[in-house]
Image (tube, rainbow, N blue to C red):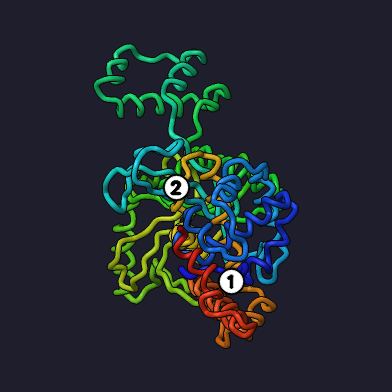
Amino acid sequence: MFPLVEFPQLVEHYAPHFAGVFSEPAFIEFKRYISGLLVSENKTVEGINRLLVQESRNQSSLNRLLTRSPFSLKALNEARLGLLEGAAGMGWKPEGVLSLDDTLLTHYGEHFEQIAKLYDPVEERYVWAHNLVTLHYSDDTTDFPVFFELWKPADLEQIEAGLRAAGVTLKESKQVLKTEAPHKWRNYLLGLWRRHRDQPEVEALYDSKLVIAERLLRAWVARYPQDKRPVTFDTWYTQPAFCRFIDQSLGLPYVGTLEGSAQVVLPDGLHTLTGYAKQLKDEHEAAVKAGERPLFRTVTLRYKGGTETYYADCNTRRVKTFGKVRLVISHRQPDLSDSPVFFIANRLHWQASGILRMHRHRWPVEVYHEEGKAEGLDRYQLRDLQAIERHIALVALVYSLLRAAQQDPALRDQLQRELEFDLEGSLPFWRRASQAHSLWCLALFIALGLAQGQSLAQVMAPLLRAVCPT
């Protein structure tokens, strides 16, 4: 990456909104760090520090921003959300949806605080990683993370001692698992924890991803008590207790996803959703053949400026362990030849089009996790947990600024005049546009130095030192 001779225009445009979060020296380091996250290919502290020529400082200054600066992550996130709420085209819209998801931040080696060996379904193997849980917002024009938190591995000794102190009986026959099958011992303790977490002293022993998800949603309700927008999530989060928490404790609507093995209660007994969908498909095909009304209706919905078509059955059904819910069975192919997907909602008057549209807005959180990794979400090297959490928060901030820039006509017009091309495109395109503007500023810096009578060697000396420090 070429050196930066000034802060990127996007950083200068939005950074003043965060000045109150930092001390004056830390604010300069904040601008340096997010500049590097925005335009550098090397997202480490060392890589970012080498970029800035005009604000050249010792690498320890950036380290202190992450490890010792007294700024508050809560204040930083409040300022970020405040900026987004007031920015053109951003903020909460009536059709906006919240989604929950988590992602692995993979690293090589175990020498990071609170890292764990976790199963990666993409790699199909266990990897050293942190696990980030995110509550994300999406509407048809934008999306951005709202709240997020790192999951921390269970402290089995603490859980065992806490369960015993709470009067929970641990089977003596299970003690042998500690040494002979540690994974089974962990599952046994966490199973006891789940069954007894209605006791406050037990619940406090461990924060599972579901507990973190509950905390993120509580933070949403505390900040926006009148906002009853829906929450959507995948099969892992679609668990009975979690759905009841959203419905009964928070009073929020939700759209969850079920596996085909879940059971629906019908007049003749329990059926798997897969079996029930096959039965409906047979009835649908018979109705079509007889010229009667089909069971699966064509559903057209708008998403991110386009339209999508589904073929869905929507009815109120009783699903085992979930109770009475609105059940949608959806296909993408008109002949229903593809595998069905199953959604449930706790608003019994909702129709298939609304449920499918809300669930479709779950996808942007996955996009954020992937694009966020391109912005440096998993490219930290500092081992301290506080430093890692601050790095993640600053990556979320840069992602949010890029989203705001897409909707900001003043910033767009300014950059378009200087770069002389249209700034209409995806978030990665806007990141490349910021890189292009920084390259333009570098060219102007060299041209100005030459115009002022400096030799090329004099102009290039600080730039070369930034690229290849001695």
Q: Is residue 348 visible?
A: no
Give 138 or 151, whichever is nearer the viewer. 151
User: Which image quarter: residue 17?
Assistant: bottom right
Q: What is the number of the mark on residue 141?
A: 1
Q: Amino acid at mark 2?
A: Gln
Give coordinates of residue 259: x percent, y percent: 36, 50
Q: Residue furthest right?
A: 20
Q: Secondary structure at mark 2?
A: loop
Q: Earlier in the sequence, mark 2 or mark 1?
A: 1
Q: What is the number of the mark on residue 101?
A: none
Give 405 or 390, whichever is nearer the viewer. 390
Judged by depth in the image, the label closer to the viewer, 2 or 1, is 2
Give 96 or 406, whichever is nearer the viewer. 406
Q: Residue furthest bottom?
A: 420
Quadrant where the image shows the C terminus:
bottom left
Give 409 or 307, whichever is nearer the viewer. 409
Give coordinates of residue 349: x percent, y percent: 57, 57
Q: Is residue 342 visible?
A: yes
Give coordinates of residue 28: x percent, y percent: 66, 56
249 up-or-down from 58: above or below: above
- Left or right of residue 224, residue 33 in this image: left
**Residue, x 66% and y 76% (percent of image)?**
411
* Circle 2 residue: 381
Q: Amino acid at mark 1?
A: Thr
Q: Secondary structure at mark 1?
A: loop
| Disc 2: CA contacts within 10 A as few (<14), some (14-19) or many (>=20) | some
**Residue, x 71% and y 50% (percent of image)?**
21
247 up-or-down from 408: above or below: above
- Left or right of residue 313, residue 397 in this image: right
71 up-or-down from 353: above or below: above
